[in-house]
C-alpha cells in the first residue's frame, strides 16, 4: 500500500455528481433499501486512452477514474487490477461489529472520498469486506443540520470522521510506511504495536490493516519477495562479472544501472512499489541482510556507491 494523493476530492466523476441528491435522500430518510449497489457505478463511457487496457471498450466511469488514479493497481495490495471493485472504505450497508451497532455509513455511499479501487481478494470475506474497526466512538447517524446533510462532515479527511480513530489505513489519508515495514522474506509487519495475532487488542493500525486487508496472503508475499530477489540478482551479477574481469569502471557502471532500476521501480505506477521504496530508504539494512555471497568489502562498495547515487538525484 502506498500513499496516494492523486484524487481531487472536489471533482468527482460526472456520474457521481448525479448521485449526490440520492445520497442526501438516503441520509435524511435512512432508506437503507434505497442504496442501490448499481447506482454508484454511474454511466458507461467509452475509454479513448490508447494506453489503457480497456481502450475502446465501454466501462463504468467511476471505476475507470479510480483505476487511473491508482495506476491500474489495487489501492490496498498494489497488485495490478484492471477491473477493480469500487470499494467503500467506510462500508455503506453494514459493518462487521460484534460489539454493537452494525449498520453502515449509508450517507457516505456516493461520497467520492469514500471510494477506492480494490481487487477482489482484498475486498473479499477473507479480506476487508465490511470490516471497519475504530478505536474511538463509532458514528452511527449522518451529520444533519436544519434538514440538510452537512457535506463538509462527509469528507473522509475531515476531523468529524477522523475522530472515530479508524484502525484501518486509508492510502489517501495515511502514510502506510509509518505503520508497516517490509521483512526481507516478503512479509509485512506492523510497527505501531501489537503482535499480529488476529484478536490481539494491542494491534496497532499497521497490524490491523495487514490482517483486515489480508496483506500477508501467499501470492503477495511471493510477489514482494520476487521484487526483492530481482533487484538483488542485478547487483550480484555485477560483482560476479567483476571477479572475472577486475574492471572497476564496468562494475561502477553496472551498479549505477542497478540503482537506476531501483529508483524507477519505486515509482507508484509500478506493482509492489512499496517494496522498492522500502529498499531505497533502508538500503544499508537491505545489503547487510540480502547478500549472503558478497564479501564485506563488496558490500561496503555497494553501499558507498549507492550513497553517491542517492546524493546525485
Ligand atoms: Zn488488493
Image: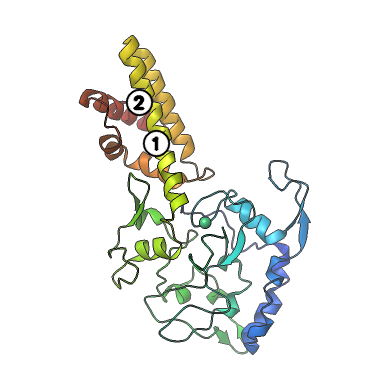
**Neighbourhood count class around disc 1 (C-alpha, 10 Å): few under 14, some 14–19, many 20 upward:** some
**Neighbourhood count class around disc 2 (C-alpha, 10 Å): few under 14, some 14–19, many 20 upward:** some
Residue at left 34%, top 45%? 185
Spatial CA distance of label 2 from label 1 is 10 Å
Q: Looking at the image, can residue 312 be seen?
A: no
Q: Residue furthest front?
A: 218
Q: Quadrant of residue 275?
A: top left
Q: Quadrant of the C terminus?
A: top left
Q: Earlier in the sequence, mark 2 or mark 1?
A: 1
Q: Which mark is residue 288?
A: none
Residue 307, above or below 50: above
Residue at left 52%, top 42%? 270
Q: Looking at the image, can residue 4 be seen?
A: yes
* Whole-percent x, y for residue 92 in the image: 58, 76
Which residue was labeled with disc 2?
236
* Whole-percent x, y for residue 28 in the image: 63, 87
* Whole-percent x, y for residue 76 in the image: 49, 57
Residue 235, above or below 160: above
Residue 228, above or below 201: above
Which residue was labeled with disc 1?
229
Secondary structure under badge 2?
helix
- Confirm if mark 2 falls within 8 A of ligand 1: no
Secondary structure under badge 1?
helix
Amino acid at each position: 500500500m502506498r500513499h496516494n494523493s492523486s484524487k481531487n476530492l472536489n471533482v468527482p466523476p460526472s456520474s457521481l455528481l448525479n448521485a449526490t441528491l440520492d445520497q442526501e435522500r438516503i441520509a435524511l430518510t435512512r432508506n437503507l433499501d434505497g442504496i442501490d449497489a448499481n447506482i454508484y457505478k454511474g454511466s458507461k463511457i467509452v475509454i479513448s486512452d490508447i494506453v489503457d487496457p480497456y481502450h475502446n471498450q465501454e466501462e463504468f466511469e467511476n471505476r475507470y477514474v479510480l483505476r487511473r488514479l491508482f495506476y491500474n493497481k489495487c489501492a490496498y495490495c498494489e497488485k495490478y487490477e484492471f477491473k477493480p471493485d469500487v470499494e467503500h472504505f467506510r462500508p455503506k450497508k453494514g459493518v462487521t461489529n460484534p460489539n454493537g451497532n452494525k449498520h453502515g455509513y449509508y450517507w457516505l455511499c456516493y461520497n467520492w472520498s469514500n471510494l477506492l479501487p480494490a481487487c477482489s481478494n482484498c475486498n473479499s470475506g477473507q479480506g476487508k469486506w465490511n470490516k471497519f474497526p475504530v478505536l474511538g466512538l463509532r458514528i452511527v447517524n449522518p451529520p444533519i443540520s436544519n434538514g440538510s446533510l452537512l457535506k463538509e462532515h462527509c469528507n473522509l479527511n475531515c476531523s468529524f470522521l477522523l475522530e472515530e480513530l479508524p484502525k484501518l489505513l486509508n492510502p489517501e489519508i495515511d502514510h502506510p510506511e509509518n505503520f508497516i515495514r517490509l521483512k526481507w522474506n516478503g512479509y509485512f509487519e506492523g510497527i505501531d504495536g501489537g503482535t499480529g495475532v488476529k484478536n490481539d487488542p494491542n494491534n496497532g493500525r499497521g497490524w490491523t490493516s495487514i490482517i483486515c486487508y489480508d496483506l500477508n496472503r501467499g501470492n503477495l508475499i511471493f510477489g514482494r519477495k520476487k521484487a526483492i530477489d530481482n533487484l538483488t540478482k542485478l547487483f550480484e551479477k555485477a560483482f560476479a562479472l567483476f571477479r572475472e574481469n577486475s574492471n572497476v569502471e564496468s562494475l561502477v557502471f553496472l551498479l549505477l544501472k542497478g540503482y537506476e532500476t531501483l529508483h524507477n521501480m519505486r515509482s507508484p505506477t509500478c506493482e509492489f512499489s512499496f517494496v522498492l521504496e522500502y529498499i531505497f530508504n533502508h538500503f544499508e539494512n537491505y545489503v547487510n541482510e540480502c547478500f549472503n555471497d558478497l564479501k564485506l568489502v563488496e558490500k561496503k562498495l555497494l553501499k558507498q556507491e549507492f550513497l553517491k547515487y542517492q546524493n546525485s538525484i
